[in-house]
Amino acid sequence: MLRTVKTWAALTALCGLALTPLCGGAAAGENKTLKVGFVYVSPVGDEGWSYAHDQGRKAIDAMPGVETTFMESVPEGPDSERAFLNMARKGYDVIVGTSFGYMDSMEKVAGQFPKTTFMHCSGYKTHENMTAYFGRMYQARYLTGMVAGSMTRKNEIGYVAAFPIPEVIRGINAFTLGARAVNPDARVRVVWTRTWYSPDDEKKAAESLLDVGVDVIAQHQDSAGPQEAAEARGVYSVGYNTDMSAVAPGAHLTSAVWRWEDFYKNFIAKVQAGEWKNGNFWYGLDSGLVGIAPYGAMVPQEVRDRVDAARQDIIDGSLVVFAGPVRDQDGRTRIAEGALPEDSALLGMDWFVEGVLGTTK
């Protein structure tokens, strides 16, 4: 049975901002149903980061013996801590937080509820009962960069980026490496919006890049604002999180996408069986968690074939996205020839590769 709190505002209106249980629902222990709560930083909508996670939630909600709820548009920081506390005090067995900025709040609450399983997406902190999990989206970014690098005519690609954190920087770098693997003259211009979901701001950021002459727009935010800007200007675009072709059918080349359904179903099945072990997990293309959306009709077959071959090379290990040599914007070698970076280096990446125009500040 699905129970939904549509927005954080709705939750606070019903329950108040005090640390009270979620309104409604059966008390813990009345049955053997596994109760799972999701907290989203943006609206679920019909595309984007929260929408992709919610498809996974719906998949587990259909499983026998599972009941889910979700809260959307919950800000990072103290509000997320209150959301996690509300769910934990109500007796939810599993609580899932899907934004990087939820990490510290979840860690704090997890320490207070040792019998609850906490799942934090995109961070790195763990606890005895708190898992950090994510996907190697940079692998899919590399592939979408190959598409963009093949389709640009001006060799100028725009990238509307959220926040200058390692996750986003790593994605920009992988995208750029992919673009330059097929087009060494390609450059990627970055504009920061410092938003995860602000359609107007993200669309305006894309327009600012279009004004300086880019002819492909990529993004790292939840909204399809950058896709709309590209469609309106008659240039190409690369989406993120979900297939955004419906928003920009004339512009959309492909998207780097998340497919959470199988991941969440497998996870919940292990929890139900008493087999889940908390830890830190980072899944790649081979898992199916990350991938790319279907190509737009404008993408030539030879481009598709080349990208598909690279995808298989990444899966079988013959292509490693950040294999050296990799140079930074200043031409300094950051990853030596023949070297493969440790995950810790990727998770802390705070520099741009050669070919990116912009700063990491």
Image (tube, rainbow, N blue to C red):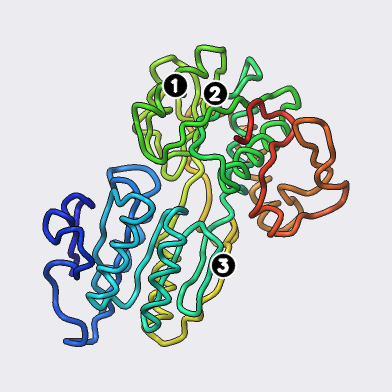
Please tell me which of labels 3 and 2 falls first in the chain. 2
Q: Nearer the viewer, residue 19 or 72?
A: 19
Vertical position of residue 147 compared to residue 266: above or below: above
| In this rendering, position of residue 230 left or right of residue 141 | left
Viewer-proximal residue among 274 and 76? 76
Quick check: 81 left or right of 281? left
Depth check, mark 3 against mark 2: the one in front is 3
For the residues marked 2 and 1, what is the alpha-carbon distance in whole angstroms?
8 Å
Q: Nearer the viewer, residue 20 or 228?
A: 20
The reply to whether callout 1 and callout 3 are in contact (CB within 8 Å) is no
Q: Which residue is mark 3?
A: 281
Q: Is residue 64 visible?
A: no
Q: Which mark is residue 230?
A: 1
Residue 75: image x %, image y %? Answer: 33, 49
Q: CA distance from mark 1 to mark 3?
A: 35 Å
Q: Amino acid at mark 2?
A: Val
Report helix, strand or loop for mark 1. Answer: helix
Q: Amino acid at mark 1?
A: Ala
Where is the N terminus found, in terms of image quarters?
A: bottom left
At mark 3, the secondary structure is strand
Check disc 2 and report its element: helix, strand or loop. strand
Q: Determine the residue positioned at 49% across, 71% down.
A: 131
Q: In the rendering, which numbered label is found on residue 171?
A: none
The disc labelled 3 sits on which kind of residue? Phe
Spot occupied by residue 126 in the image (x, y as percentages of width and height): 53, 70
For the point 41% across and 65% down, the residue is 106
Q: Which circle marks residue 216 in the picture?
A: 2
The answer to whether marks 2 and 1 mark residues whose Cβ atoms lie closer than 8 Å is yes
Residue at image location 64% in from the left, 32% down from the top: 302
Rendering quarter of residue 135: bottom right
